Amino acid sequence: MPLIDCDVHNAFADVRGELRPFLPRLWQDFADRHGIAVPPAGYVSPVGVQREDARPPGGGIAGSDPAYLIRDHLERYGISYAILTGSHILGASNHFDPDWGNALVRAYNENLAARWLSLSDRFRGSIIINHSDPEAAAKEIHRCAADSRFVQVLMASGSNRLFGQRFFHPIYEAAAAHGLPVAIHPGTEGAGTADTPTPAGRPTRYFEWHNIVPINAMAHVNSLVCEGVFEKFPGLKFIAIECGIAWLPHLMWRMDKNYKGLRSQVPWLKRLPSEYIREHVRVTTQPTEEPENPKHLVQIFEMIGAPEMILFSSDYPHWDFDSPKVALPAVPADWKEKILWRNAAALYGLKLPEPAAIGG
Amino acid sequence: MAMRRHAVARAGEIPPGGRKVLMVGKLSIGIFNVAGELKAYRNACPHAGAPVCVGRISGTSLPSPVYEYAYGLEGCILRCPWHGWEFDLRSGEHLVDPATKLKAIAVAAGPSESLDPVTVETSGDEVYVLLPQ
């Protein structure tokens, strides 16, 4: 069966060395003095972030050698396409200086096209944007969208505003103009200009911080629906990468119930909130919730009621990697086929040969 | 089915925009003057049984493009005091789900969430409701 991995982290062995050639002279000088500065979230894991076993034999951190990534991950698991989601870069949205953030994401995208997307047709890129400057982000989307190897827009999920708000609409307008989905990825919650990782305060340790990351995706999805983003941009798809899945029934039920009484505040909504979520929001599997009884996760998927919402992801080469070989043990075959590749192929416009019929 | 007339108000007692909530036998009902037309509903919300007829009467924001507002249906919206569901007093329909009604003409067809219909009649100086005997 084909397989599309929707969260693969290409990395830098030498981030300054690789991005410097793509920076304007002024920002080269800045990088020479201060490095490729992005604000840290400040939470450190006892496991580290990169998988020890994924370190390239030639040196550099895991994910930094494209040829080795192909061998170690794509070939090992028979992955047809990897959606590259980057490293060290999402915090460009959370730096205090939006001009540095803009220069940085552009350099990143140019490096990605030159060093990764040109190397293998199995790599597909994310246009990383600086969401703190939506007009500049829209320009970067227009610039990169000319290269069809970029298949989505990706931005930090850490923010000091909820993503449905009108401030961000230029990003969605630009993405929708090119038929590109907009994705968020965690990691910058609490970093730089981003608000605290939870509205109730800062978690104490990485463990606690990692547990509660989905709260941020819930808040953004809620905002996108309530602000009418999917009425204003009816073709737009929004992907919450690595933010969990099991919270969806709760959010959908709560939004639908409230809508029945509070509809008058959002007269632009024409359908139940859950209907917008099913049509426009996508989530990725890793880190898959692992209930003691795996069938309970399938029941949650049934409650969500939209198998097309769910995309397989491994998060290679990070510590909380989900192996395609053992992922989704109890999920029925027809759903699994959608999750492992059909949904992503449809979302990203990736062509794949139909698998031969069994016994055919 | 035999119907019985119950006097519930004097003619003109309920002005446009006004209402009267009263007991008829063991039944609590609300009588509303919606732009000159009298409507009566059982005082029980189809959602959770709240005394819906004492809810606020208002207009509401009509369907509109994103970030635009159009206020209308002034005096036609009854908002349940529990949970805030909005009902169109002209039809009894819930604005989000019109199949859920305060007053369902098709109640005989039996949607479980629909209220019993109450027919209002004016004769001489009195307003009556007609209820099954």
Image: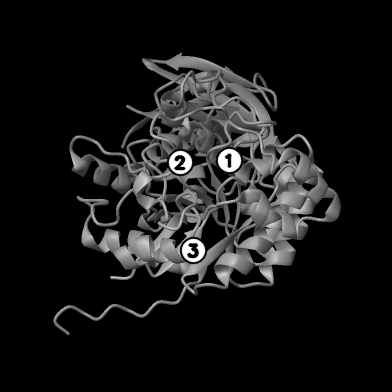
Residue type of the residue flagged with mark 2:
Cys
Residue at image position (41%, 59%) is A5
Q: Which mark is residue A243?
A: 2
- Alpha-carbon span between mark 3 and mark 1: 26 Å
Q: Which mark is residue A66?
A: 3
Local crowd at mark 2 within 10 Å, few (<14), some, or many (≥20)? many
Local crowd at mark 1 within 10 Å, few (<14), some, or many (≥20)? many
Local crowd at mark 3 within 10 Å, few (<14), some, or many (≥20)? some
The residue wearing badge 1 is A157
- List the single residue furthest toward the left: A359
First in sequence: mark 2 or mark 3?
Answer: 3
Q: Nearer the viewer, mark 2 or mark 3?
A: 3
Determine whether label 1 and label 2 are within 8 Å by CB: yes
Determine whether label 3 and label 1 are within 8 Å by CB: no
Residue A128 at what x, y percent from top left?
64, 54
Residue at image position (45%, 32%) is A254
Residue A321 at what x, y percent from top left?
36, 47
Secondary structure under badge 2? Answer: loop
